[in-house]
Image: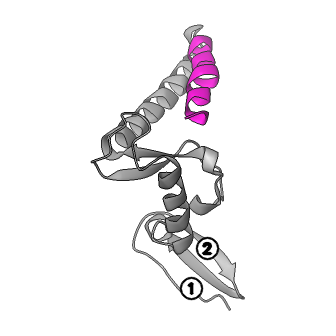
Amino acid sequence: MTKILAQGGGGTGTTFKSEGIFIFMTYGEKLKDPRWQKKRLEVMQRDNFKCQICDDITSTLQIHHKSYDFNVEPWDYDLDNLTTLCIPCHELEELAKSKLKDLVLRLEKQGTFKHKIVMEFYNNVYLKLNKNG
């Protein structure tokens, strides 16, 4: 018998087994988990509680995952994959990543030569920039 201990409303989540009991957590619930809160604090302390793009120390800060892996919990990422960003920079970062991926996919579908230039930028510049902070 599967017992669901926690189930949030809406959004995506993960079911995992803990002490023989299946637990479902939405992403929002995971961000409240003590394991994430501890990891989040480690990242902010490492980054001196400032946005790593604009050096803002007065705005609300968030932790940005530079990349995501399937079935990896937010708190299980290496510190190198996490960075502190203010909300405006975090939103711009996510928007830029989304738009760039959309562009790469669109050009790939078209089979145009420009696709190689964009892919080269994406793989050699953008990903390295985000990996190195």
Q: Which residue is drawn at 56% across and 61% down?
A: 39
Q: Distance between the residues labelled 1 and 2?
A: 8 Å
Figure quadrant of the C terminus: top right
Q: Do the residues labelled 1 and 2 touch (CB within 8 Å)?
A: yes
Asked which secondary structure carries label 2, the reply is strand
Q: Does the magenta stretch include residue 29?
A: no
| Colour convention | one colour
Query: In the drawing, what numbered circle is on residue 15?
Result: 2
How crowded pointer 2 is (Cα within 10 Å; few <14, some 14-19, many 20+) is rated as: some
Q: Which residue is drawn at 65% across and 60% down?
A: 76
Q: Eyeballing the image, is 66 above or below 9?
A: above
Q: Which residue is drawn at 48% across and 24% down?
A: 103
Q: Eyeballing the image, is 19 above or below 28?
A: below
| Residue behind mark 1 | 4
Front-most of 77 and 59? 59
Figure quadrant of the N terminus: bottom right
Q: In which quarter of the image is residue 57?
A: top left
Residue 72 location (% of width, % of height): 65, 58
Residue 33 location (% of width, % of height): 51, 72
Q: Residue 13: in sight, yes or no?
A: no
Residue 48 location (% of width, % of height): 45, 48
Amino acid beneath label 1:
Ile
Front-most of 94 and 104? 94
Which residue appears farthest toward the bottom when viewing the image? 1
